[in-house]
Image (cartoon, rainbow, N blue to C red):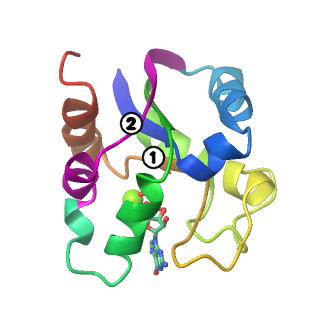
Amino acid sequence: VQRTLVLVKPDGVARGNVGEVLRRIEAKGYTLVALELRQADEALLAEHYAEHAGKPFVRPLIEFMSSGPLVAAVVEGQRVVEGFRSLAGATDPTTAAPGTIRGDLARDWGAQVIENVVHGSDSPQSAAREIALWFPAL
Ligand code: GTP
Ligand code: MG
């Protein structure tokens, strides 16, 4: 079966959304394989966001992601990469559909970077790379 890396970003932790995000993952029938509250350092985040290197939002993105604790999880299930992206909704919280995590829990706060509560790997290849980065022991 497939695995994906889910992050509850610092905005989601600060606003108390951890339980709600995990509830939706479990309600869908996916399985938690690893779960950790941690403070991510800039080196880890630069690796995590390597695909965005050079884009104008990557510096504020890394600052935001290291601004407080986040929750990292490995989630397992049939087609979970696609399935969690569907639960999360569109990147932009203003247009993310109601019923999705971002549509229900996030909005535009006028911050430098889009604050959208969760991250989910965008392909099985990204998931393998990200899981190895965040949970090398798995
Ligand atoms: P993740 O699951 O977090 O990776 O979101 P995504 O796959 O929907 O978006 P993407 O990987 O393209 O971008 C990663 C993160 O960078 C987003 O979730 C946003 O927090 C931020 N971001 C993406 N695009 C923009 C942008 O155009 N402007 C700003 N300010 N932030 C962006
Ligand atoms: Mg992405």
**Where does residue 114 sit, x and y in percent of width and height?**
56, 71
Question: Is 33 one of the magenta-colored residues?
Answer: yes
Q: Which of the marked residues, 1 or 2, is nearer the chain's N terminus?
A: 2
Q: Which stretch appears magenta?
A: 31-49
Q: Amino acid at mark 2?
A: Leu
Question: Is 14 one of the magenta-colored residues?
Answer: no
How many other residues sit within 10 Å of disc 1, few (<14), some (14-19) or many (≥20)?
A: many
- Where, quadrant-wise, is the N terminus in this rendering? top left
**Where does residue 75 sit, x and y in percent of width and height?**
45, 25
Residue identified by numbered label 2:
5
Kindly identify the residue that appears in the image at 50 percent across and 46 percent down: 68
Residue 77, can we see it?
A: no
Q: Amino acid at mark 1?
A: Gly
How many other residues sit within 10 Å of disc 2, few (<14), some (14-19) or many (≥20)?
A: many
Kindly identify the residue that appears in the image at 74 percent across and 67 percent down: 107
In the picture shown, does residue 47 fall above or below 71?
Answer: below
Q: Quadrant of residue 94?
A: bottom right
Residue identified by numbered label 1:
120
**Where does residue 31 sit, x and y in percent of width and height?**
52, 16
